Amino acid sequence: MRNALLSSFILLAACATDGQNATGPRITIEELAERIQDGAAPAILDVRSKGEFDDGHIPGAIHIPYGDLSKRLSELPVKQDGELVVYCKSGLRAGWAEKTLSEAGYINVRDLKGQWKAWQAADHPSEKP
């Protein structure tokens, strides 16, 4: 029991909000926005809830809620070595998703610095379904 609690604490600390302790390389919102505008965007994965996604998301983002990710990996449009940017509202779910993806063999997963909050704050374009 003690080990399980310690493991849970470590996982939560590693997935702090705003991606402060992101597990992989990061991409800035400015770099992602520029790549989208240039038509060179990587695959983008939104792991927020359906309601959050429907309220607005990064253009071209694929929606798979974090809780469904391990069962829906086959829906990702990249191979395990393809570039994949992951984001949520503030970083916690994205951190968990990055861990899930890493355990599934994905090796080029990038964390969006600042997450959806920063994307909105910078007034970058968003889309709705």
Image (spheres, grey):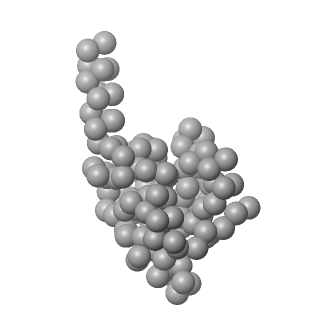
Instruction: Say which quarter of the image contains residue 109.
Output: bottom left
- For the view shown, which residue lies furthest in the bottom direction? 38
Q: Residue at x 62, y 50 (%)?
A: 52
- Count of number-bearing discs: 0
- For the view shown, which residue lies furthest in the right direction? 129
Q: Position of residue 99 (x, y in %)?
A: 39, 45
Direction from residue 127 to residue 19 in the image, left or right:
left
Direction from residue 70 to residue 28 in the image, left or right:
left
Task: Look at the picture and state if 67 lies above or below 113.
Answer: above
Task: Look at the picture and state if 2 lies above or below 57.
Answer: above
> Dividing the image into 4 quarters, which one contains the N terminus?
top left
Q: Residue at x 54, y 58 (%)?
A: 45
Task: Look at the picture and state if 86 lies above or below 37.
Answer: above
Residue 102 appearing in the image = no
Q: Position of residue 120 (x, y in %)?
A: 51, 64
User: For this rendering, which residue is in front, 99 or 12?
Assistant: 12
Residue 106 appearing in the image = yes
> Dividing the image into 4 quarters, which one contains the C terminus?
bottom right
Q: Residue at x 37, y 68 (%)?
A: 27
Direction from residue 18 to residue 84 in the image, left or right:
right
Q: Residue at x 36, y 46 (%)?
A: 17
Q: Position of residue 40 (x, y in %)?
A: 51, 82
- For the view shown, which residue lies furthest in the top direction? 1
User: For this rendering, which residue is in front, 7 or 49?
Assistant: 49
Q: Position of residue 98 (x, y in %)?
A: 41, 50
